[in-house]
Amino acid sequence: MATAKVVFATITGNNEDIADIIAQALEEKGMDVEVEEISQADPADFEEVDLCVVCPYTYDEGSLPDEGIDFYEELADVDLTGKVYGVAGSGDTFYGEYFGLAVDKFGQALENAGAKQGAQNVKINLAPDSDEDIKRLDDFAAALAQAVNA
């Protein structure tokens, strides 16, 4: 059975919801999934799974979550060659060009660590509370599961 680790950063609960939606969709695709809050997670744990998923929030003008900065920096110290990654997170479209930049930054860090992108990044405005948001996250999870099983 393929394995996945979903790591999230949240203040308002929006990204925990995003992580839970993704985890449930991955489980429905037959994957064994562990979900963990980013300040409790170790990037080295990604070396033990097939799929690495990060769900960060972006605040202000493209800033990473404070509680996720160590995790982000430590991704440079792991070898994720042969792993598949995906990044989905929330932001606020009020910030225009800075909307969801943490999603892109984490994606680049995972790619730099050797992982292969399994699905296009997903950026959710605030909370994943519309049917469209949930469909986008379900489709994201389906693409990740397919990439792992390819």
Image (tube, rainbow, N blue to C red):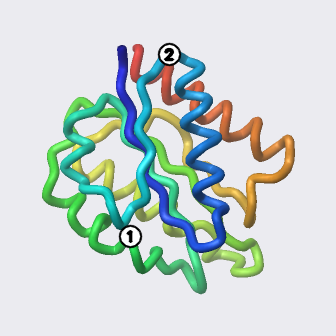
Q: Residue 51 appears in which quarter of the rendering?
A: top left
Disc 1 marks which amino acid? Gly
Residue assigned mark 2: 30
Image spot of residue 111 (x, y percent): 32, 48
- The correct choice, above or below, for 33 with respect to 112 in the image is above
Which disc number belongs to residue 146?
none
Q: Nearer the viewer, residue 58 or 49?
A: 49
Q: Secondary structure at mark 1?
A: helix
In the displayed structure image, the side of residue 33 where residue 92 appears, left or right: right
Crowding at mark 2 (Cα within 10 Å: few <14, some 14-19, many 20+): few
Earlier residue among tags 2 and 1: 2
Q: Say few, some or many: other residues with alpha carbon within 10 Å of mark 1 (under 14 / 14 to 19 / 20 or more).
A: many
Image quarter of the C terminus:
top left
Q: Residue at x 24, y 58 (%)?
A: 75
Please identify the residue farthest to the right as the structure is shown: 131
Taking 12 as reference, is 35 above or below it?
above
Q: Amino acid at mark 2?
A: Gly
Residue occupied by mark 1: 68
Q: CA distance from mark 2 to mark 1?
A: 28 Å
Residue 108 screen position, x and y as percent: 37, 57
Residue for point 56% across, 51% down: 88
Local SS, label 2: loop
| x and y, in percent, of residue 124 in the image | 70, 57
Using the rendered view, name the quadrant where residue 46 is placed: top left
Q: Residue at x 58, y 56 (%)?
A: 16
Q: Is residue 92 above or below residue 113?
A: below
The residue lying furthest to the bottom in this view is: 60
